[in-house]
Image (cartoon, rainbow, N blue to C red):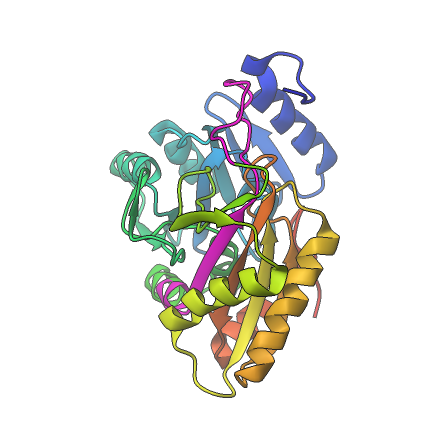
Amino acid sequence: MKKFINNVDDILSESLTGFADANTDILEVKFKPDFIARKSKPAKSKVALISGGGSGHEPLHGGFVGYGMLDAACPGHIFSAPTPDQMESAANYVDSGKGILFIVKNYSGDIMNFEMGTDMLDLENQTIIVNDDVAVEDSTYTTGRRGVAGTIIVEKTVGSLAETGASLEECKTFGEHVNKMTASMGVAFTSCTVPAAGKPTFDIGIDEMEFGVGIHGEPGRKREKIKTADEITSELLGAILEDLKPNHNQEVLLHINGFGGTPLMELYLLFNSSKKILDQKNIKISRSLVGNFTTSLDMAGGSITITKLDQKIIKHWDSPVHTPSLRWKM
């Protein structure tokens, strides 16, 4: 195992410390229990958005704490759910009087711990479960579809709505709508290596790929020989479009996400392959996002996410955002 490590037990705390020091204008990190919070409190009372999950998927979720997205994020140990006291502490810290909205990926451990965290709160709260992965209905970690790269779309759009002063129920309803309009699927060429394990999570042949892999390296639909980028893209998009069933001339957001070990050059190639297919189907890419946003440590591979757009989703995707890993002005 070749990684930048001092001590395996300290990797998360040292990483969070560096993350905080690199972004002192945007956020702060609290320890024991660990959570990341916006440094500047909102000028007006707003619904506070909190997400989180196991570390190893950076920049999800901590990289999206800031104006226009999350108010706080709770990082668990690598690929492990955060603990209920993290959610409780984060919620009490960022609450500004309009309630807490938790955005949770559909993994059994995450859901269980977030539910326990909400039970500990005296604050009004609601939860959105993100389940955009169309690869499998059930896996090692879930009952139902997994929450993967589509989470960033939900966090960005609902974060924008919350900034307008919308109510807790309005934010929850909109988030559930965005989730239903979003579908993802990925493929892995290599395993990832969890530092505490010191070896790859799974074995895969040099000429093989795991089709429909999860972001922890859990199995997907099938394992097969590596194909061309166009062939892989066609299979991924086929599953996604079958789920979303977009109309002709449907406007979409196309998100090409890397798992951490694939060069950006290849991700843009994947975007090109996707555009050719969508153009043939008269599906219009009007918004795009390419890069490593929901990673799996050092796994080589990537995923495709499509969100069917309407005017409200476009408005809140385009709105200003200022976080360590996503920022733009309009």
Residue sitting at 63 percent across and 26 percent down?
Answer: 15
**Which residue is at the front of the view, 169 or 110?**
110
Q: In the rendered view, does 263 fall on the left or right side of 166?
A: right
- Estimate the x, y position of residue 85 in percent, counting from the top left: 37, 28
Residue sitting at 68 percent across and 21 percent down?
Answer: 2
- In the displayed structure, would residue 77 be above or below residue 122? above
Is residue 189 within the magenta segment? yes
Q: Which picture quadrant has residue 231?
A: bottom right
Residue sitting at 37 percent across and 28 percent down?
Answer: 83
One can see residue 198 in this view: yes
One can see residue 161 in this view: no
- In the displayed structure, would residue 239 be above or below residue 86? below
- In the displayed structure, would residue 271 be above or below residue 29? below
- Estimate the x, y position of residue 4 in percent, counting from the top left: 70, 21
**Which residue is at the front of the view, 278 or 41?**
278
Q: Which quarter of the image is occupied by the C terminus?
A: bottom right
- Estimate the x, y position of residue 14 in percent, counting from the top left: 64, 21
Q: Which residues are magenta?
A: 176-204
Q: In the rendered view, does 24 fall on the left or right side of 234?
A: right
Q: Which picture quadrant has residue 260?
A: top right
- In the displayed structure, would residue 247 be above or below residue 147? below
**Which residue is at the front of the view, 24 or 176?**
176
**Which residue is at the front of the view, 165 or 239?**
239
Q: Which picture quadrant has residue 92?
A: top left
Residue sitting at 40 percent across and 55 percent down?
Answer: 133
Is residue 142 within the magenta segment? no
Q: Which quarter of the image is occupied by the N terminus?
A: top right
- Estimate the x, y position of residue 216 in percent, counting from the top left: 46, 37
Q: In the rendered view, does 301 fall on the left or right side of 91?
A: right
Numbered marks: total:
0
